[in-house]
């Protein structure tokens, strides 16, 4: 049997950096919207890599399927919640100016929060899809 | 909070959808879906009231003023469609709680309600938004959740049906996004009102005409206009019953709304009818759809699929009304939007009751159900008669305006009126095939089969009674539809 | 003066990077089987990408862009051999037969050490 | 007064509820039926009283489409129809009690329920205040009689039901509805008005087409070629046939034709344009062809059915004549044919129940064992043919006079020939019954008159045929209010 | 239709070619996964069209905005450059990816239910089931 | 000079694409696609550099990451028919 | 398994080191050095370290700080080797007549840890002309494009250098 030293060690070394990079993309994506989406994809990719190397079960122990589904749901809630908060603060839906005294800062916080929602959702959806695929092949011999 | 009604219309189902996943119990998720869909209906009704009293309601997302930011803009047309969608959403949600027990895997039920609410959110969003790109986004939200909903059907054919719908729906959506992009390139705006103001300057350009074509084909794919309807019959036949009831009553209606909004409000009636000859393109398609699909429906043995083909034919009626290029014709279209939602909703929900008890809607399996499930089959009969267009049902009201619209045009259009009537008779044939089997054959199935539970019957009969109520008192609906038609036509072809 | 030197250096690096890139690509087409092609692909990944990115670094000078370019390069150099190794391993266990001069197959399970497997070319 | 109109619809509806409630107790159930029928007749009589003094009670039920209400209005023609229908409902109920029990029919409750529903729809048709309301109740009548037609539940019954509903709905949706929308487009209203609403609003050609759409669109009038449903519906129990032929369905059809001609087109307008001449001849053709086909039928009910096809076109013909005499004759014939034909059907049913005979050729000598029935049949025959001393002679007289007035001498000839034909094919039955020797071996032992309740009904209608000869005044007066003297 | 016309609109031709390729794959391939690939190529061609047209991406000048709540007093600083064009493409891409995910998920379940991903095969199985009913 | 580099990259990618299309084995295609991926990373870097958009380098990094993980996933799928299989621990070490 | 105190400390220190490395990378990547972004950086690195620790992948293999010093010497040498073998393979490919003589060979590697084997295997693969195709224990299976690539001295040198690199730290 051929063992997987190379890929295993490689994945181990890479993973923390990938996670860090994902969040870096999120926090620095504010000037060009969409950071949340890319970050979600990258974060999901990190776990996909771990699952490829350590097996689905190992990853699902840390990241159970129900948790991932909730992430997908939670992101939408964050997104809509930010809108509702701005509404409660007397502005229109997603009127970020409401989030801080300084309009620019408010915009920044708002986009960051919304992108966080996007990140969490994209991460949840992507990992769910990966689980779906990775979990299916098992029934074949 | 009342100034936020436009956004709440979308946000309430949008926020409830993920919460359904958090509530991992099927019934809790269902209860939340009911709550959300009822709130959506209340909001839609409030919006309609506001629009009727004050005219157009506008809401700027994120405080960005309209031409730049996304604007939600409600006039009488989309207020009307919102009410239709929200009504069906509110009726089907409680029905689904019981219905999915037999039609969806238990562990997928929270997912079902999530997708249901997302679909509702998408459809409401398409209707309410005043931004063309936002239309595309909501269209995809509703479509993706629709694919998921269809695939939840128990039979494996639900999967292939969903897949085919996905392929055709995505092609349609891509066509729409091409059209939207071209419009943006030409005008630099995505705001509908802005587009409507800017487009006349560039009417002559080929790009605008190409955009028009892409949008037309894309939307017609979504609304299953013959011959782009191929995805619909199987999708409706194999989806879980509440999904079929919901989709058949709302999804294609919203697509028709999109067609009206894009071609009459944004491009304008003058461009559509006088420059592009939209009526001349739609008329033959609508007629062929009505006749051929009615004919095909007659020979179906699966009643769900039978009604699905009937839906394609009924979409033909709506498009036919548009092709009259007159206020009366458009009134017929808008009325039929509402009326067809009521009748198909009632019919598919009645079928859902049948599925709940006997697990099949093959015509043979329904023999003798008239006695076993009297309320269910009575609902089916009333819905069917409405489909045929028997007076005192809503179906009659739309047929009335459709024929009136045709006769107003005089001449050869008499023949169009004749075809409408002929196909009503065909509807009678396919409806009656089922009725005859249910009432005049002896029951052959399991002896324990009895009437469907109240939790299914009450929503079903709510729609059945609506079929009758709005058939007996159609003054208000007719007036709203006529008002909406006048807004859309803006003085063109009014007679 | 310094600018000119840097400019020439950039030219040199980019051109030689392009050279290895193209050579590797030719090898991808020319070489007889998947295993030999891996060596060609490796050229593009190592010297091809390396020299071009180095050229960009030289051009850009010492700043955050260079840091990023180096990060990209480090990532490519770190992952490329892992992917190639995984591919080779998968190909062998998947039944791909390495090309040999004589046309007879090398036995991948052969336990003989260095030099075993393929006889020398005539 | 307008409350009475509502009651005329509500009473049969309440009756259905009563019948359903009392379904476990047949006697109470039938009593409820009878009482309801009696009450309804009393109500209609009250309305008759008011209308004959010139009142026009009216009522709006709802407004389904802006400008097109669901409205009731009692005018003389409608009252005439309502009178006939409500009176014959009593008689038919009595007859049904005997027949259904004697024949051991299943689902008797369903029968009475839909019977009552059908009568309610008939009242709606009779008192319809506009074309739309007429159409609504016309369609409801088709639906409520469908379960009656398919009562037996056999394959033959299903097939008949398909033909029945198929023809009635396709003509009404295909032609009638089109004509209604067209009328609305031309006139801007659908209300029935004296002198017509289309008067002066349409050309001769349009009127001719519209009139045709109405005549053929009202499939219940059974004008050829849309008559097939009538013989097909013969599979139904005899009381249903009676209801179809005499009381409700076909009468609703010809009544609608007459009412539309009078109140939508206006007879003067139609006569002036001459737009109805082609339909006169269509009606004439139906009259002759119907009679000829009746001749060929050995099955008694089928023969009666084709007789009805033929006779209905008398009414249509009268309407198309579009003059005072013709319309009076037309209206009177609705009544006279109703009493005559219901007598014949009752007799046919009684023969079926008592002797289990359905073919004309089997009736030889039966008259001696069932004298009352065969006498009644004879009276009914006279009325259908139009011979004194029966009511039928009046309507035939007025129709003939109307034809002459319209200058259509040829139609007089058609009337004569058709009368002779009907005399021939109907008189064969009492003649066979009384004067032919039964075939060998005789099967008539043990056969006696039909059930008691049925017999009462038969005698009542037969007597009514004679009474209407002596006292046709109520109907005549109503018709003169419609068409002028 | 000069040569110049073709050359100056090269991006259109590339996009149209890609679109046709995608559409061709979508229609002609019986394998469901290949259909999804075709759909992706088809969609990607549209994104490329917009990216290449340049009017949508980049080159959009920042917009000076009136503060919506400022009561007419114009805000001098650019709050954010108009994010619209980027967002459009990005959203469309996200939608495309979501569609692909759902499509692939369906394909997985179809493979499980039918044991094949070939359309002909699936149609055959479905026809058999229908005949059996 | 960047244009020349870009051209070299495109030609190299085209040649690799030939290999991807020709095969003949699945491994050839994976190898070629992985190689195209790496070249795309370089291309993105060059183009970003050319357009003065250093944020393209983040994109290049993301692309490289996806390329790597995608390759590993495809290989695992080819080898095991299952993306979620655990490591085989029947050898030494691990 | 018993967790001794030194092991705990070792683990925690590795976590801290990993955190530090990540934060270093954050500072390299980030071009905003405001307080807010530093806070973001702290959060980011903490999340990354936390997740990695929960996955159980923070250990000697994944945080090879002990090799840092040796790597400074090894990496330049490796780059040079890569360049040399690139040239050799380029000559093979560009030769008018393709002269490849591929073979697969097995040999025993001197590294004692998986990390060492990982470095050695990747170094072999990184240099064109040879590809590690399999490792079982200390047995390496390598594919070479021409025989000379593998029976030359480079491989032995590389084997030794990696072993030294590994050994220095140990
Ligand atoms: Na080497
Ligand atoms: Na190598």
Image (tube, helix red, strand yellow):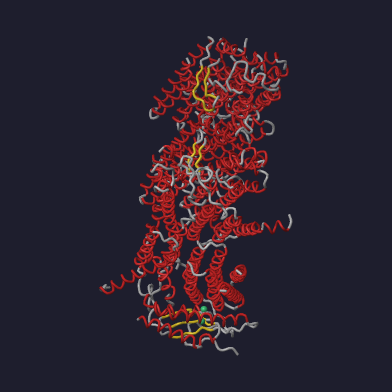
Q: Which residue occupies 49% across, 85% down?
A: G105
Rendered image quadrant of residue G10: bottom left
- Left or right: residue D377 versus residue D19 is right
- Left or right: residue B41 versus residue E88 is left
Q: Measured from the top left, where is residue B241 in percent x and y?
A: 46, 46
Camera-side residue: C58 or D440? C58
Say above or below: C3 vs B16: below
Q: Measured from the top left, where is residue D157 in percent x and y?
A: 54, 35
Rendered image quadrant of residue G49: bottom left
Camera-side residue: B333 or D366? B333
Camera-side residue: C118 or B202? B202
Q: Measured from the top left, where is residue B4 in percent x and y?
A: 43, 40
Camera-side residue: G3 or D244? G3
Say above or below: B30 vs D44: below
Q: Measured from the top left, where is residue E57 in percent x and y?
A: 56, 55
Say above or below: C47 vs B388: below
Say above or below: D161 vs C16: above
Q: Is residue B218 visible?
A: yes
Tell me the quadrant of the picture where the N terminus of chain B can be found. top left
Q: Which residue occupies 69% across, 17% down?
A: D271
């Amino acid at each position: 049997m051929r063992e997987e030293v190379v890929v295993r060690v490689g994945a181990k070394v890479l993973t923390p950096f990938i996670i860090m990079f994902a969040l870096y993309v999120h926090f620095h994506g504010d000037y060009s919207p969409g950071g949340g989406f890319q970050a979600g994809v990258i974060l999901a990719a990190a776990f996909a890599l771990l699952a490829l190397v350590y097996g689905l079960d190992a990853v699902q122990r840390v990241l159970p399927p129900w948790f991932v589904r909730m992430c997908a749901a939670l992101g939408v809630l964050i997104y809509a919640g930010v809108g509702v908060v701005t509404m409660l603060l007397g502005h229109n839906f997603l009127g970020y100016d409401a989030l801080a005294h300084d309009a620019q800062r408010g915009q920044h916080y708002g986009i960051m929060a919304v992108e966080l929602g996007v990140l969490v959702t994209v991460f949840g959806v992507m990992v769910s899809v990966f689980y779906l695929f990775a979990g299916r092949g098992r029934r074949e011999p | 909070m009342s100034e936020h009604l436009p956004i709440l219309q979308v946000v309430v189902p949008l926020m409830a959808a993920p919460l359904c996943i958090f509530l991992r119990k099927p019934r809790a998720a269902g209860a939340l879906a009911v709550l959300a869909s009822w709130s959506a209906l209340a909001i839609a009704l409030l919006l309609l009231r506001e629009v009727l009293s004050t005219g157009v309601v506008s809401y700027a997302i994120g405080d960005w003023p309209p031409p730049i930011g996304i604007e939600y803009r409600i006039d009488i047309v989309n207020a009307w469609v919102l009410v239709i969608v929200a009504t069906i959403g509110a009726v089907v949600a409680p029905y689904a709680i019981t219905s999915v027990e037999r039609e969806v895997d238990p562990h997928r039920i929270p997912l079902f309600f999530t997708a249901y609410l997302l679909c509702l959110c998408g459809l409401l969003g398409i209707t309410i938004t005043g931004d063309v790109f936002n239309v595309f986004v909501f269209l995809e939200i509703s479509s993706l959740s629709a694919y998921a909903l269809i695939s939840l059907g128990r039979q494996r054919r639900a999967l292939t049906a969903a897949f085919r719908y996905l392929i055709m729906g995505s092609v349609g959506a891509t066509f729409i996004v091409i059209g939207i992009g071209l419009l943006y390139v030409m005008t630099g705006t995505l705001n509908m009102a802005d587009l409507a103001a800017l487009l006349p300057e560039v009417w002559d350009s080929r790009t605008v005409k190409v955009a028009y074509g892409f949008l037309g084909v894309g939307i017609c794919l979504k609304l299953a206009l013959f011959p782009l309807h191929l995805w619909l019959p199987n999708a409706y036949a194999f989806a879980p019953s509440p999904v079929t009831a919901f989709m058949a009553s709302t999804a294609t209606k919203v697509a028709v709304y999109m067609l009206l909004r894009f071609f009459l409000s944004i491009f304008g009636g003058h461009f559509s009818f006088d420059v592009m000859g939209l009526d001349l393109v739609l008329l033959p398609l609508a007629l062929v759809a009505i006749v051929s699909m009615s004919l095909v429906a007659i020979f179906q043995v699966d009643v769900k699929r039978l009604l699905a083909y009937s839906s394609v034919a009924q979409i033909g009626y709506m498009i036919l009304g548009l092709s009259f290029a007159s206020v009366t014709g458009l009134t017929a279209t808008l009325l039929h939007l509402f009326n067809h939602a009521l009748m198909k909703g009632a019919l598919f929900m009645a079928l859902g009751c049948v599925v709940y008890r006997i697990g099949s809607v093959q015509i043979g399996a329904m023999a003798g159900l008239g006695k076993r499930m009297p309320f269910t089959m009575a609902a089916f009969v009333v819905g069917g008669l409405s489909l045929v267009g028997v007076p005192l049902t809503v179906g009659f009201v739309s047929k009335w305006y459709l024929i009136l619209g045709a006769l107003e045009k005089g001449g050869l259009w008499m023949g169009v009126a004749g075809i409408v009537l002929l196909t009503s008779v065909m509807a009678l044939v396919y409806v009656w095939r089922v009725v005859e089997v249910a009432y005049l054959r002896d029951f052959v199935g399991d002896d324990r089969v009895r009437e469907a539970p109240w939790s299914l019957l009450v929503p079903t009969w709510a729609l059945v009674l609506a079929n009758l109520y709005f058939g007996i008192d159609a003054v208000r609906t007719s007036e709203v539809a006529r008002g909406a038609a006048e807004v859309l036509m803006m003085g063109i072809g009014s007679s | 003066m310094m600018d000119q030197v840097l400019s020439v250096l950039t030219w040199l690096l980019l051109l030689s990077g392009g050279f290895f890139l193209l050579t590797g690509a030719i090898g991808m087409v020319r070489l007889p089987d998947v295993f030999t092609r891996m060596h060609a692909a490796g050229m593009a990944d190592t010297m091809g990408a390396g020299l071009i990115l180095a050229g960009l670094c030289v051009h850009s000078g010492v700043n955050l862009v260079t840091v990023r370019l180096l990060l990209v390069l480090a990532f490519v150099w770190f992952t490329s051999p892992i992917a190639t190794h995984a591919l080779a391993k998968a190909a062998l266990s998947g039944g791909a037969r390495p090309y040999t001069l004589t046309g007879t197959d090398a036995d991948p399970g052969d336990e003989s050490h260095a030099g075993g497997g393929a006889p020398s070319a005539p | 007064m307008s409350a009475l109109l509502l009651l005329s619809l509500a009473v049969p509806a309440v009756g259905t509820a009563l019948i359903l409630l009392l379904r476990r107790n047949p006697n109470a159930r039938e009593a409820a039926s009878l009482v309801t029928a009696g009450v309804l007749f009393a109500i209609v009589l009250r309305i008759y009283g008011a209308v004959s003094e010139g009142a026009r009670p009216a009522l709006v039920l709802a407004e389904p489409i802006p400008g097109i209400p669901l409205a009731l209005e009692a005018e003389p023609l409608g009252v005439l129809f309502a009178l006939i229908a409500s009176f014959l409902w009593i008689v038919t109920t009595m007859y049904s009690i005997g027949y259904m029990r004697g024949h051991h029919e299943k689902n008797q409750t369903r029968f009475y329920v839909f019977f009552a529903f059908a009568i309610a729809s008939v009242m709606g048709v009779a008192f319809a205040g506009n074309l739309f309301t007429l159409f609504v109740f016309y369609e409801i009548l088709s639906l409520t009689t469908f379960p009656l037609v398919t009562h037996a539940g056999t394959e033959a019954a299903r097939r008949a039901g398909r033909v029945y509903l198929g023809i009635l709905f396709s003509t009404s949706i295909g032609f009638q509805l089109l004509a209604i929308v067209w009328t609305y487009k031309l006139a801007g209203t659908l209300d029935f008005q004296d002198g017509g609403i289309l008067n002066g609003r349409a050309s001769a050609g349009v009127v001719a087409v519209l009139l045709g759409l109405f005549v053929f669109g009202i499939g219940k009038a059974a004008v050829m070629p849309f008559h097939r449903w009538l013989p097909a519906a013969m599979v139904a129990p005899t009381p249903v046939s009676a209801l179809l032929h005499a009381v409700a369905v076909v009468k609703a059809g010809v009544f609608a034709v007459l009412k539309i001609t009078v109140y939508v087109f206006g007879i003067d307008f139609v006569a002036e344009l001459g737009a109805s001449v082609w339909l006169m001849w269509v009606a004439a053709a139906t009259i002759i062809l119907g009679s000829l086909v009746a001749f060929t039928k050995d099955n008694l009910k089928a023969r009666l059915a084709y007789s009805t096809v033929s006779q209905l076109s008398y009414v249509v013909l009268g309407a198309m004549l579009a003059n005072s005499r013709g319309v009076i004759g037309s209206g009177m014939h609705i009544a006279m044919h109703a009493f005559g034909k219901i007598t014949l059907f009752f007799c046919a049913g009684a023969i079926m129940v008592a002797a289990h005979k359905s073919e004309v050729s089997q009736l030889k000598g039966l008259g001696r064992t069932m004298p009352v029935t065969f006498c009644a049949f004879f009276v009914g025959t006279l009325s259908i043919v139009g011979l004194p001393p029966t009511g039928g002679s009046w309507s035939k007289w007025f129709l003939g006079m109307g034809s002459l007035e319209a200058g259509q001498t040829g139609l007089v000839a058609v009337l004569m020939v058709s009368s002779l034909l009907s005399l021939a094919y109907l008189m064969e039955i009492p003649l066979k019954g009384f004067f032919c020797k039964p075939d060998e071996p005789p099967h008539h032992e043990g056969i006696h008159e039909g059930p008691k309740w049925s017999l009462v009904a038969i005698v009542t209608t037969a007597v009514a045929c004679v009474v209407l000869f002596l006292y046709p005044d109520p109907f005549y007066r109503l018709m003169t209010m419609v068409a002028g003297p | 239709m000069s040569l110049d016309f073709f050359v100056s609109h090269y991006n259109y031709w590339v996009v149209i070619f890609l679109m046709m390729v995608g559409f061709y794959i979508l229609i002609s391939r019986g394998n469901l996964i290949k259909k999804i690939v075709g759909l992706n190529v088809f969609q990607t061609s549209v994104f490329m069209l917009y990216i290449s047209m340049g009017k949508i991406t980049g080159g959009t000048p920042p917009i000076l905005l009136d503060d919506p709540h400022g009561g007419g007093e114009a805000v001098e600083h650019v709050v954010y450059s108009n994010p619209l064009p980027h967002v459009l493409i990005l959203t469309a891409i996200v939608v495309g990816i979501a569609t692909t995910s759902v499509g692939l998920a369906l394909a997985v379940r179809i493979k499980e239910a039918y044991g094949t991903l070939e359309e002909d095969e699936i149609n055959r199985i479905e026809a058999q089931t229908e005949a059996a009913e | 000079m960047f244009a020349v580099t870009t051209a070299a990259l495109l030609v190299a990618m085209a040649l690799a694409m030939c290999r991807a299309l020709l095969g003949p084995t699945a491994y050839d295609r994976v190898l070629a696609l992985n190689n195209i991926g790496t070249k795309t990373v370089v291309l993105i870097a060059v183009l970003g550099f050319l357009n003065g958009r250093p944020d393209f380098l983040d994109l290049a990094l993301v692309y490289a990451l996806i390329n790597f993980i995608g390759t590993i996933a495809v290989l695992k799928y080819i080898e095991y028919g299952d993306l979620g299989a655990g490591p085989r621990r029947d050898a030494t070490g691990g | 398994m018993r967790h001794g105190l030194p092991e705990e400390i070792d683990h925690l220190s590795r976590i801290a080191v990993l955190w530090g490395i990540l934060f270093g990378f954050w500072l390299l990547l980030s071009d905003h050095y405001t307080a807010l972004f530093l806070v973001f950086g702290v959060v980011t690195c903490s999340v990354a370290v936390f997740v990695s620790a929960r996955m159980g992948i923070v250990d000697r293999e994944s945080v090879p700080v002990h090799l840092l010093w040796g790597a400074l010497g090894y990496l330049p040498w490796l780059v040079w080797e890569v360049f040399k073998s690139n040239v050799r393979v380029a000559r093979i490919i560009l030769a008018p007549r393709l002269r490849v003589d591929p073979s697969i060979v097995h040999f025993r590697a001197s590294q004692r840890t998986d990390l060492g084997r990982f470095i050695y295997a990747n170094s072999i693969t990184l240099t064109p002309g040879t590809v590690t195709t399999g490792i079982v224990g200390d047995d390496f299976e390598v594919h070479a494009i021409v025989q000379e690539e593998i029976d030359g001295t480079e491989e032995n040198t590389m084997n030794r250098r990696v072993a030294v690199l590994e050994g220095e730290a140990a």
